Amino acid sequence: MSARSWRELLRDKQVLSWCLYDWANSAFATTVMAGFFPVFFKQYWSAAGTVSESTAKLGLANTVASFCLGASAPFLGAIADRSRGRKKLLFAFTFLGALSTAALFLVAQGNWLLAALLYVLGSMGFSGAQSFYDALLVAVAKPREMDLVSGLGYGLGYLGGGVLFAINVFMTLRPEIFGLASPAEAVQISFLSVGVWWLIFTIPLLTFVNEPELPHPKESLNEIIRGAWSQLISTFHHLRSIRPAYLFLIANFFYIDGVNTMIKMAVDYGMSLGFPSNSLIVALLLVQFIGFPAAIGFSAIASRISTKRALYLAIGIYALVTAFAATISEVWHFYALAGSIGLVQGGIQALSRSAFGKMIPADKSGEFFGFFNMLGRFSSVLGPTLIAVTSLISTSPRLSLVSLLLLFATGGYLLSRVPFPEEHK
């Protein structure tokens, strides 16, 4: 049976409902993580410190969030696999993330510590829910459809995140139209809107996506927890025996670190170079609306040249963009940077998720994706830490960014050692 087209897939209620969660949680990734939080943190909550100090604080907040989630992701995945509870845990983390994000609305000027704490909790909610969302990919798509379904999810994520972000940006530019006193109040309202948006568009997934069948009978909570620990150890050994998946996780650890760091620190980098915050926000919008068709298009490219070659292409473009970013001096350079990233950001994320999904057993997808997201989160510890430490030591934001080239080069080399299923057809 041939794979369905993306139009046919979007008419499938389960597929569309699954993809809409990307539409829901991408509001956090755009408005909060990449957009307003770095700007507001530097100019409102941490304005008393130097540029290097605020960059270090933001890098530390990202590091703490990534470490906490990375340490718990595989165990949570094991529990989800044994309890038929992926959707329940997805909602629990979604609620944590949405509530923490909305609470940023209440943080007073200068209270950078509380803002950082809520940001850490929001990031944990975002990343934790993502693990269970990824694991449900095997429930809504056949192996040959995973690249396209994963790309559709990321594509709708870029569109949904971009739509709300555009509304929020307009609120900050014309706050009086919305009855707001200042751009700062508009940003605070934007954090509140992300929490509401995130919860509303999670409802279709909770309603229409079916949990995969379990190969064992229902268990009590104590049995689930005890079994999860033993299953975690067993799955780790199982993962090591699946050479393609094991090697792919290691390669992904490095190159996706560069991707995640660029997402989290790009606006802070632009501000450190003295670019106007409004111009940086417009550049982020550019990434979102280029990213929508590009994520879907990259999945189509993968079907023609293979998933592995498409990942090589994306990593290569990221390396070139990083080198270019270290030399920029004009605002239009930042726009060019944003446009280039928009072409590959969704593609590399979507193909990484679907490539791993095709390498693992479907009945253990929650736990295997727990490892996948664990390494993704721990890799996100390395990147921001490199940025923070290099920024403090050298006081040069350009030099701190160059360090990301090592991550892309290492990830690309390790990817060459991964045997993909498509190479053996």
Image (cartoon, rainbow, N blue to C red):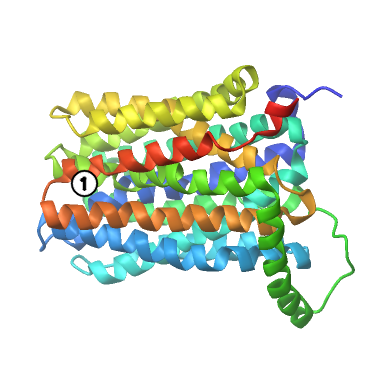
Out of 3 and 380, give the one closest to the viewer: 380
Residue where numbered disc 1 is placed:
400
Residue 320 image-quadrant placement:
top left
Please tell me which residue is depicted at 58% across the width and 57% down the height of the picture.
129
Image mark count: 1
The amino acid on which the numbered mark 1 sits, given as a three-letter code, is Ser
Residue 74 falls in which quadrant of the image?
bottom right
In front: 198, or 243? 243
Q: Is 258 above or below relative to 328? A: below
Q: Position of residue 198 (x, y in %)?
A: 53, 52
Residue 299 in sight in this render: yes
Could you tell me which secondary element the residue under label 1 belongs to?
helix
What residue occupies the far bottom of the structure in this picture? 222
Tell me where residue 97 appears, x and y as whole percent.
49, 61
Q: Residue at 31% of width from left, 29% of height from top?
A: 321
Percent position of residue 178, x then y: 32, 45
Left of 215 or right of it: where is 356?
Answer: left
Taking 295 as reference, is 180 left or right? left
Mark 1 crowd level (few <14, some 14–19, many ≥20, 10 Å Cα): many
Q: Which quarter of the rendered picture does the N terminus lie within?
A: top right
Q: Nearer the viewer, residue 156 or 2?
A: 2
Name the residue at 43% across, 52% down.
193
Q: Position of residue 318 (x, y in %)?
A: 37, 31
Does 340 sit left or right of 250 as displayed?
A: left
Q: Is residue 259 left or right of residue 108?
A: right
Residue 210: in sight, yes or no? no
Q: Nearer the viewer, residue 230 or 208?
A: 230
Picture quarter with the C terminus? top right
Q: Residue furthest top?
A: 304
